[in-house]
Image (tube, rainbow, N blue to C red):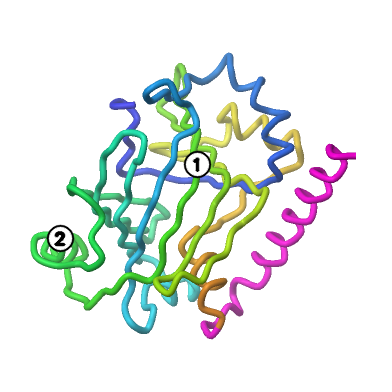
Amino acid sequence: MDEVKLMKRTDTKFIFPIATLHKILPKLVDKYYVLEIKGKRLNTYRSLYFDTEDFQFYHQHHNGKTNRNKVRFREYIDSGISFLEVKRKNNKGKTIKKRIKVDAIPNSLEGENKLFVDKTMGKSLTLKPQHWNKFSRITFVHKLRKERLTIDVNLRFKDVESNKNNLGEIVIAEVKQAKRNLSSDFIRLIKKERIHPFRISKYCMATAKLYPQLKINNFKRKFLHLDKVLQDAYSAQENIST
């Protein structure tokens, strides 16, 4: 894991029903190691996302703006570790993440935490907590290449008023590489299942669902695809049940 922190990287994402995950997992064994923490391979993450009052970060992503930021606290529950993280997507498609360790997730951005965010972004914004999310993750590390693969399931989210939503039986997989390489073993495997890269932001999808007053014009195709995958997931689950 230390060798594949990949704080500056490219990300290739995929979404698919959990039934597909059950099908492909055995095929990953020969190519990837799996992270285990205290005997657990399915680890829980919890995040608190911040944005401006008028959702500047969300709108930047929605409008396709490059050099955009994302600010969150993330707790690695099984490890007992928390970080304040600033992720920046630059105009070359690279994701650059900087973070500092914190004792716990606070409900506001103040003091040294605020200074860190301002310095990292190169400007000062008034940020407020907008929503929580929680999911379970399996983390794989390629045995030969500098590549990390994360498999996220059971994504749930809620706003600060405790309005809740979730993505049901959907898997979000993300291949993280120093330089995009589509010959990745996972990418080749998932393409055989007729599943292709799908750009999705957990933050934006959750924000759009929790705050329906926000514009989603440029995300409509993504939501249509997401709804189709959800329907496929429910259908597969019903077939298993019967």
Horizontal and vertical percent position of residue 144:
45, 17
In the image, residue 55 sits, relative to residue 224, either above or below, namely below
Q: Which mark is residue 113?
A: 2
In the displayed structure image, the side of residue 109 where residue 169 appears, left or right: right
The part of the image, by quadrant, that contains residue 90 is bottom left
In the displayed structure image, the side of residue 219 where residue 179 appears, left or right: left
In the image, residue 123 sits, relative to residue 99, either above or below, namely below
The answer to whether the residues at label 2 and label 1 have Cβ atoms under 8 Å apart is no
In the displayed structure image, the side of residue 76 where residue 158 appears, left or right: right
Q: Which mark is residue 19?
A: none
Which part of the image, by quadrant, shows the C terminus?
A: top right
In the image, residue 71 sits, relative to residue 60, either above or below, namely above
Magenta segment boundaries in residue numbering: 213-242
Where does label 1 land, which residue? 136
Q: Main secondary structure of the magenta part?
A: helix
Q: Is residue 12 magenta?
A: no
The part of the image, by quadrant, that contains residue 6 is top left
- x 68%, y 28%: residue: 24
